[in-house]
Amino acid sequence: MTSQSLLDLPDDLDAVLADVWQRLGRAAKDRRAPMHTPVVATITGDGVPSQRVMVLRAFDRASATLRFHTDSRAAKVDQIGDGSPVSILGYDPAAKRQFRLSGVARIETDTAAADQAWGEATLFARRCYLADPAPGTVSDVPVSGLPAEIEGRKPEDDDEVAPGRANFALLMAQIDTIEFLHLAHTGHRRALFHRAPDGQWRGEWLVP
Ligand SMILES: Cc1cc2nc3c(=O)[nH]c(=O)nc-3n(C[C@H](O)[C@H](O)[C@H](O)COP(=O)(O)O)c2cc1C
């Protein structure tokens, strides 16, 4: 089934799941894709939900894992640690589709994958990790947090952003639940998928 026919009215669970994979894959590669910047929700130490927009950097279908980049000193990194529940929400207004994904997130700082992601990031992206003091620190005046000598310009080379590597982290979210909602005046559609321990996804329809 093509994504165009899916836009009409999804009536097949396998096709719905295929649509989810296709949109997540595109969202990770295309900065204009609506789900490129989903909302990622964690839970604070006080048990309060905390949400923020993040850029989806990669999606691996086989492991059902989404990759995000963040500063290792950020509040969400403390909240996640080695493994914590995470909920990720994306909406595609043109397709009228909402994806609510949930699973377990973990932080990686010293892995080969983190090294690779750091090496592939642009100089401007790597510059963000030079903030000093750490993101979230109270300041008497409005600040970017970047050292004055690099603020407002593109870093010249890898060496100039290298100190930021110590503050760079991956937020890896392995999802095990997907809730799909499609809005249509002819009748909404809602489906729920769970990943079984064998890695297979099983879905069922819900009343929207
Ligand atoms: C469009 C957009 C994209 C963003 N992308 C990221 C991102 O990829 N990683 C990140 O850590 N924060 C990103 N942010 C900032 C977060 O929303 C958030 O303000 C920041 O990470 C602090 O969150 P925390 O205190 O909960 O850790 C983005 C914000 C916007 C508006």
Image (spheres, helix red, strand yellow):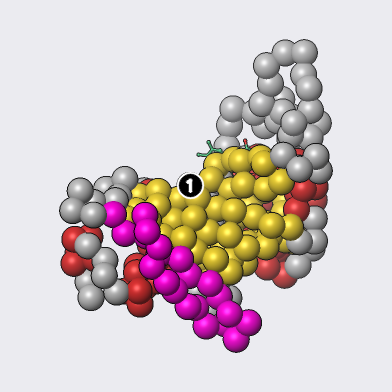
**Is 63 drawn above or below residue 145 in the view shown?**
below
Quadrant location of the C terminus in the rendered image: bottom left
Q: How would you classify the magenta stretch by its main secondary structure?
A: strand
Going by the numbered disc 1, the residue's amino acid type is Thr
Q: Residue at x 58, y 69 (%)?
A: 176
Count of numbered tags: 1
Percent of width and height locating residue 92: 35, 50
Q: Residue at x 50, y 74 (%)?
A: 61
Q: Which residue is mark 1?
A: 37
Residue 195 included in the magenta stretch of the image: yes
Q: Residue at x 20, y 48 (%)?
A: 185
Quarter of image, ligand 1: top right
Residues in magenta, as a range: 188-208
Percent of width and height locating residue 164: 74, 46
Q: Nearer the viewer, residue 106 or 207?
A: 207
The answer to whether mark 1 is within 8 Å of ligand 1 is yes
Q: Nearer the viewer, residue 185 or 89?
A: 185
Quadrant location of the N terminus in the rendered image: bottom left
Percent of width and height locating residue 40: 58, 48
Question: Is residue 178 visible to the viewer in this orientation of the structure?
Answer: yes
**Is 136 drawn above or below residue 64 in the view shown?**
above
Question: Is residue 122 visible to the viewer in this orientation of the structure?
Answer: no
Percent of width and height locating residue 38: 50, 48
Left or right: 180 in relation to 185: right
Q: Nearer the viewer, residue 41 or 110?
A: 41
